Every structure is written in C-alpha cells, then in structure tokens.
Image: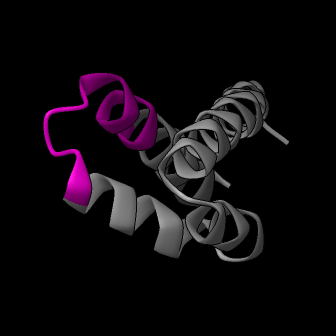
Amino acid sequence: MQPVVAVSLIFTLVLGAVLWIYLLRLAFAESTLLGITAIAIPPLALLIILAQRPQDGELIALTVAVITFAGAVLTLS
C-alpha cells in the first residue's frame, strides 16, 4: 500500500467516524425515528438532514471531506 493511500484511508476513517457521530447527534435532536434511521441507514439520514439544513456548513464540509478522501483512496489504490 502506498503511503498516500494509507494516509488518505486513515483520514477517511477518522472523518467518517466524526461525521457519523455528528449525524447521530443532529438526528436524535430532530426526532427519535431519524436517530434510529441514522444508526441503521446513515446515508439516508444524511440526505434527510442535509435537505432540512442546507445552511449547515460544518455538516456539508465534513461530508465533502469524507467523499474527497474516499475518492482518493479508491483512485490511488
């Protein structure tokens, strides 16, 4: 494994975990059903919350960072 791929993979995993915890916090604050959806189907809950909060810059930035690093891992590996 190339060093760039390894570093990108670590960033993807860490940022993905941070995004999921942040998503859980937002989802359970919105409703219990959305929180359970965030546990079971995180991408669906992310789309629902992004549709409800288009101005939430932190959530959008974390999502873009995870997608970017995941793309780098898939491209370079």
Is residue 65 rendered to the left or right of residue 9? left
* Residue 69 horizontal/vertical position (percent): 53, 39
Q: Quadrant of residue 68?
A: top left
Q: Look at the picture and state if 44 lies above or below 9.
A: below
* Residue 26 horizontal/vertical position (percent): 52, 40
* Residue 34 horizontal/vertical position (percent): 56, 66
Q: Nearer the viewer, residue 8 or 42?
A: 42
Q: Nearer the viewer, residue 21 or 2?
A: 21
Residue situated furthest left in the rendering: 55
Its colouring scheme is one colour
Q: Residue at x 23, y 55 (%)?
A: 52
Q: Nearer the viewer, residue 3 or 23?
A: 23
Q: Is residue 49 part of the magenta span, yes or no?
A: no
Magenta: main secondary structure: helix
Report the quarter where the C terminus lies: bottom right
Residue situated furthest right in the rendering: 1
Q: How many marks?
A: 0
* Residue 24 horizontal/vertical position (percent): 66, 46
Is residue 56 rendered to the left or right of residue 32? left
Q: Nearer the viewer, residue 75 or 62?
A: 62
Q: Quadrant of residue 51?
A: bottom left
Q: Residue at x 42, y 42 (%)?
A: 63
Q: Look at the picture and state if 31 lies above or below 72.
A: below
Q: Which residues are magenta?
A: 52-64
Q: Residue at x 36, y 40 (%)?
A: 64
Q: Is residue 54 part of the magenta span, yes or no?
A: yes
Q: Residue at x 76, y 38 (%)?
A: 13
Report the quarter where the N terminus lies: top right
